[in-house]
Image: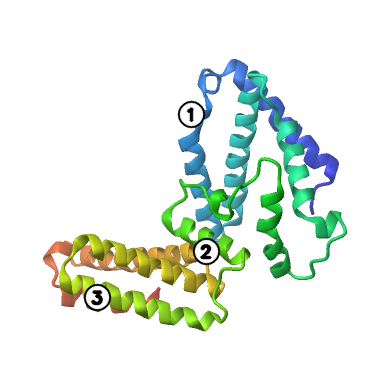
Amino acid sequence: MSNTKEQKLQGFGRLLDILDELRVKCPWDKKQTNESLRTNTIEETYELCEAIIKHEIPEIKKELGDVLLHIVFYAKIADEKGQFDIADVCNSLCDKLIFRHPHVFGSEVANTSGQVEQNWEQIKLKEKGGNKTVLEGVPSSLPSIAKAHRIQDKARNAGFDWEQKEDVWEKVLEEFTELKQEIHAMDSDKMEAEFGDLFFSLINAARLYKINPDNALERTNQKFIQRFNYIEQKAKEQGRLLKDMTLGEMEVFWQEAKSEL
């Protein structure tokens, strides 16, 4: 059963109290800065994403707590410097949510998620201190696959997209053909550029077909790991090392793994 609003606020208040005490009494917590926490924050975010992909509910709860701790920690550091506190963070977020949802808190109408997304970028352009251009809000530090997906999504919200999603496959084939030409010419710089174009077009296709490309690739990563581990285990059972096996022998185990995993 879900906790009441009062219980949720009590839990959040408990976290704030504990962090206040840690910041005073714990040597490690006391010395942390925004800069020292940054890499840990990235790691915790990836751990949360992994738990989500694996549908591990207890792990999702745990990793959400770790991410929340970091949010509260950054706000605590800012509070100590007289910059802002966690209440300012929450109120700023609330103001933004209200402003960006005029179909909920105002008089505008949006009956579908598609209509909401179409209005999203234009609303952000109107925000005080908001993005000056449509693509400005894409973080430069995003991993390349996520960045490409986000760039394409923002362009779509501005009306720049394929009229028919099926048309994207012609672009994919075009980029593949251009890549093969550069491979034949053995121009390494152009090969890299064409690989990038091909990846970008495939990510575009994934977006159009409502597939998250990062999730899709991670599923394949995990599948490959399972099957490769199976081959390695079978080799160990025979008292052999992978490097001593032929590709044909490994292929036999690979096919077994495909049927069993």
Residue 163: which quarter of the image? bottom right
Q: Amino acid at mark 1?
A: Glu
Which residue position is annotated with label 1? 35
Q: Earlier in the sequence, mark 2 or mark 1?
A: 1
Work out which quarter of the rendered image holds the C terminus and state it: bottom left
> Which residue is outermost to the right?
107
- Looking at the rendered structure, the secondary structure element under dot 1 is helix
Residue at 17% x, 77% y is 248
Q: Give the distance between the C-alpha atoms of the residues marked 3 and 2, in whole angstroms.
A: 25 Å
Position of residue 242 measured from the top left corner of the image (x, y, whole percent): 18, 64
As shown in the figure, which amino acid type bears the numbered disc 2?
A: Gln
| Between discs 3 and 2, the one toward the N terminus | 2
Question: In terms of secondary structure, where does tag 2 sit?
Answer: helix
Residue for point 88% across, 59% down:
107
Residue 28 against residue 52 in the figure, above or below: above
Mark 2 or mark 1: which is in front? 2
Task: Count residues near mark 2 (Cα–Cα under 10 Å), then give few for <14, some for 14-19, many for 20+.
Answer: many
In the foreground, 19 or 105: 105
Residue 152: assigned label? 2
Residue 150 at x, y = what percent? Answer: 53, 59
